Image (cartoon, grey):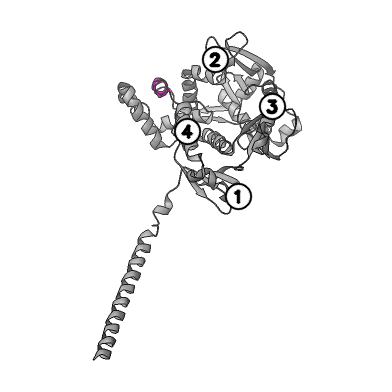
Amino acid sequence: AVVIAGIGYGMIRSQRTTVEVQAAAATAAATNKAEAPSPESLLKLDAMELEVGYGLVSLVDTHQGGDLLERISAIRRQTAADMGVIMPPVRIRDNLQLPAHEYRLKIKGAIVARGQTIPGQLLAIDSGISSGPLDGTPAKEPAFGLDAWWIDPSQKTRAETMNYTVVDPTSVLATHMTEVVKTFSAELLSRQEVTELVAQLKTKAPKLVEEVLPTVVKTADLHRVLQNLLRERIPIRDMETIVETLADWMPKTKDTDVLTEYVRNGLRRSICQLHAHTGENGKPRIVCITLDPSLEDFINGYIDRTAAGTSLTMPAATATSVADQIVRGLQQVTAAGHHPVVLASPTVRAVVRQIIEPVMPSAAVLGYNEIVQGVEVESLALITHLPIKPSAAASHRTPQESAA
């Protein structure tokens, strides 16, 4: 009886264990099925993404003393204060395929910048006034491409005495990210964010928004004008002036480029403040180069203005020649330690910017109407019209020019 009872107890226990195992397996399968991403969730695209090598995880991990997350929060606040746009959240991922100390910045899934930073070391940046090399690893500062050295922290005092700018590895990455945000702010500004900016303006100027938006000024047109401003790093904080200017001129023209020029004129005080520095007499001064009227007339001859918008019909060889002349003049401005600025007539300002952007994207092109009273202008060079060689012109001539 005892043996039979033991066998029966063992069979019952075995059946109970089998049932429990099957139940656990079913629960695990259900959990895995629930955690599997849906196809819809895979379609989500992050506006900004930072991929880091495994050697840079310590910059992100707060338990290891990393403060990159705090720096990103500070960048978002600074961008809002300087540019008037909200920097989107940044998704940070570790990528084992990257070298240990390399990182990549993506915008909407596309790689737009990459760089290198080394935890535990400092980057000594040569701004052009250093007095000699350092004992370290030669490198390039990723944000501006300046010559630099990765050095041991014990050499910081020596590097500073030799006129190097010494920064920590997190600052290297944060500065690069800030420049990327400023460069691609026009792409980061979505239609939804424009709607939110309008909602904020409505709390400040409700009558203006009710009268103008969207009856006179469409959200799509406002979006394009704001993007044009951000492409040249013009802050859009003064939304009230921007909307008022568009309301005045939109009934007269639908050309977004022309409307942008009117808005720039309304923001001329802010634009001057961006590029002016205090002169020896204490007054604000803009150091720049100017264009000869003959060159402006030459450029204006290639501008085609229609109801659909403004376009440039200049041949590639001619545009390259003009850009080279302007860049050579701007080298005098940068050699004097100033930001490259070109001063041109309002009719050709936008086109001049379009011509030199591929060669010197950091250069600013201002119109004469954007210089406010009280700001002095110092021109270091006058760019005259120098036609390109006939052989080069013939090889790049358009069919319309050949017929003419």
Q: Residue furthest front?
A: 2
| Amino acid found under the numbered disc labelled 2 | Ile
Q: Which mark is residue 371?
A: 2
Residue 18 spot, x, y in % from top left: 32, 77
* Left-right relation of 145 to 251: right
* Residue 95 showing in the rendered view: yes
Specify which label sits upstream in the sequence, 1 or 2: 1
Magenta region = 237-254
Q: Is residue 252 magenta?
A: yes
Q: Which residue is at the front of the view, 316 or 161?
A: 161
Q: Residues within 10 Å of mark 3 (few under 14, many from 20)?
A: few
Q: Which residue is at the front of the view, 242 or 249?
A: 242
Q: CA distance from mark 1 to mark 2?
A: 49 Å
Specify which label sits upstream in the sequence, 2 or 3: 3
Residue 99 spot, x, y in % from top left: 61, 50
| Amino acid found under the numbered disc labelled 4 | Ala
* Residue 218 showing in the rendered view: no
Residue 403 spot, x, y in % from top left: 66, 33
Q: Between tags 2 and 3, which lies in front? A: 3
The residue identified by callout 4 is 74
The C terminus, quarter of image: top right
Q: Between tags 3 and 4, which lies in front? A: 3
